[in-house]
Amino acid sequence: MKRPFKTRIKTLKIDGIDVGAREDETILELAQENGIFIPTLCHLEGVHDVGSCRLCLVEVKGSNKLFPSCMTYAEEGMEVITNSERLQTYRRQVLDLLFSERNHVCAVCVSNGNCELQWMAGKLGITHVGVPYLYPQLAVDASHPYYAHDPNRCILCTRCVRVCDEIEGAHTWDVMGRGVDCQIISDLNEPWGLAESCTRCGKCVQVCPTGALFTKGKAVAEMKKRHEFLPYLRSMREGRNE
Amino acid sequence: MFNKLEEIALEERGKAEQYTHTINVCTAAGCASSQSDAVKEALENEVRNHGVEKWCRVRGTGCMGLCAAGPLVAVEPEKPDEVLYQYVKVEDAGDIVASLEDKPVERLRCSTDIPFFTRQKKIALENSGYIDPESIEEYIARDGYSALMKAITEMAPSDVIDEIVASGLRGRGGGGYPTGLKWTTVAKSDGDTKYIICNADEGDPGAFMDRSVLESDPHRVLEGMAIAGYAVGASQGYVYVRGEYPLAVARLKTAIRQARRANMLGSGIGGTLFNFHIDIRLGAGAFVCGEETALIASIEGKRGQPRPRPPYPAEFGLWGKPTLINNVETLSSIAPIIRNGGDWYAQIGTATSKGTKVFALAGSINNTGLIEVPMGTTINDIIYEIGGGVSGGGQCKAIQTGGPSGGCIPADYFDTPVDYESLAKLGSIMGSGGMIVMDESSSMVDVARFFMEFCMTESCGRCVPCRVGTVHMYNILDKFSHHEATPRDLVLLEKLCDMVRNTSLCGLGQTAPNPVLSTLRYFRNEYVEHMVTETNGSGPVTKQMEVAQ
């Protein structure tokens, strides 16, 4: 016999707190709703998640695996732990790897003081980087009239790729290459200034968590990002029942 | 329709009876690379020169297994008198043809009584080497497509799944997920549109099982896919083959065309209402596309990158539809199971791992090639009996199974039966079936470094641990192999292994540390020996500082 109803509302526990959830809500959303902090870098409200930064991993009781909270949906009876010693170690290691991957020199960065990576490092208590730096040689692209792209500060979170594709609809950005050689490219790896699909809207610049994308003319520590436009745009487009 | 199949089979068998002798030449990749094409041509010429074409024919067939001794040529009058020739050259063609009515050419002869042939049990490879892979008639003559006809005319889809569940077949691509369970979940998923995908993106270094099946017996894979389609309710299938296998792609294309013409694929298969279409999609050389979610992204035309699971493809797969993904070898075991029943298959193998498994023997072993053995055969039997021992007569130090996701098993554990659980207990995995044999001269640090380099260059770059972690691990292993590592490096290496394994997004990253972890487990002393050496006047001294055990 067919079940006459479908359960849409679930109850679960996050860090011991009882939480009520819709089935389409993620653990991350529920945690934020209940004032529980889960670190994230690639997550950006308003575009789809990719689960790539691995900072938001959480433990679920009964499973040995770790789950990316941005892409794990509420389930009945779930018991989630968002901040164990094991998770803290892994999160610090993720930041270690990010800092070692490219040339993140805060002292000369336009986003110094306003950088999500820098802030996260402080928040998670990073005092030093435990792995050797890789020091790649990457060229800055300043061909665009308004903005510039410095891949040395890029953490490959692909927020710019997603916002350009899903919100602006231009899909100027994408990823090229494999593994540690991955690079964010505009159009078919042309200089940003020559990328015909770019509408110069600047959404990518505003959502970039670091100083990898910035407005020209900003000096050290002057680049403040404005994220507010995205929830606004989204609510305007989708109506208030969102 | 049954009659039509039988007609083709009868006709084909009748044709075969005209000939008292058939000379089979292996034309699969292994022998083809040692010019078996030229040998085949020479044999054809000689048959004509000797004027024996009335009763003797020359055929190109699939892999005969013993790739080390290629090109292989088999002369079959009747089965017990079959003569196998090894290392055949173009010049030998005359002698072989001249000897047909006389005694075989002893200098080329390869005994078929050796354990390599007698200890094997062929199910997935039953037709390999016996049929022309480019002829559907020969496949039908050996009961081809009878399982598909049996399924769609005599069985309900749920009966087909029941047989697969009863067989105990588990995924041959690596994980060992129960095939019957996978089929059940896809069958139960909502939706009218479902897809079948055959994962032929075989990328492990040293593995060539799937390639050989596709090159030797492509119809068997198509038949397995069509049966799967009937069982779960799909009418479209895709074969995702790596572009590096041009011969396999060509033979698959031929096979699909022939099957369509014979009404074994397409609309209204065999006069029933069942439709099933198969298309080929080519991979562009990314190892990660063997991971199912990356494979789906690649078929969809996107960048081949995995996504977190769940949702599993069984519910949310290709274009968001329920999708069944099975490996080539899994699909090629389907037809025999339907033909002979699940219980027949379940008799073979061990309690938890049923049936047979194809292994690609490579490395320092005498009988390099392809073998199919029942699950539960011990590693000793595989290497020393079937494999003929270590080449050069030395001792075997370890074997590596499961490619870059697997691990090394040292000689002390060679009495272990090969099944999914036993290998996992030893810190390795069954994987797709690559088995690389290493002798005493192999450095385990170099082995780990080789596989880490592979994972590093094949990482897609999406998640941080795999993208950056593999680079650091590779750099540390490189230091070890140059005797520049310090005890601190060893500690860091182990930390990174733990982190990458537990936090990576997909299977590639999660298993990338396995070769390191398993060599550390069994050959830790080699890592210690590879640490910084200092000269204290009399020669190099290994600095064996307090290394965390």
Image (cartoon, coloured by chain):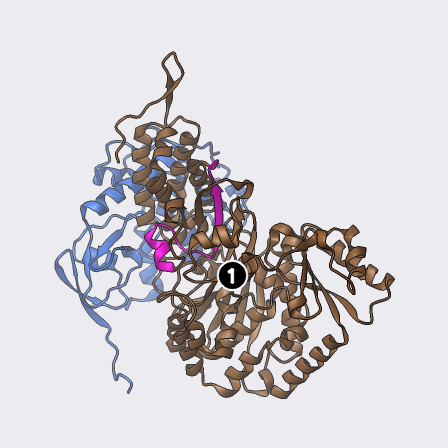
Chain colours: A blue, B brown
Magenta highlight on residue B434: yes
What subunit carries mark 1?
B
Residue with the mark numbered 1: B119
- Say if residue A104 shows up in the picture: no
Badge count: 1
Q: Amino acid at mark 1?
A: Arg
Q: Residue furthest top?
A: B537
- Say if residue B288 shows up in the picture: yes
Q: Nearer the viewer, residue B53 or A139?
A: B53
Q: Position of residue A183 (x, y in %)?
A: 47, 43
**A102 sits left or right of B32 in the view:** left
**B309 sits left or right of A175 in the view:** left
Q: Position of residue B224 (x, y in %)?
A: 52, 72
Q: Residues within 10 Å of mark 1 (few under 14, many from 20)?
A: some
**From what the image shows, is residue B138 above or below residue B36?**
below
Region of the chain picked out in magenta, as a range: B420-442
Name the residue at 45% across, 80% down: B160
**B294 sits left or right of B108 in the view:** left
Q: Position of residue A160 (x, y in %)?
A: 41, 49
**From what the image shows, is residue B210 above or below residue A141?**
below
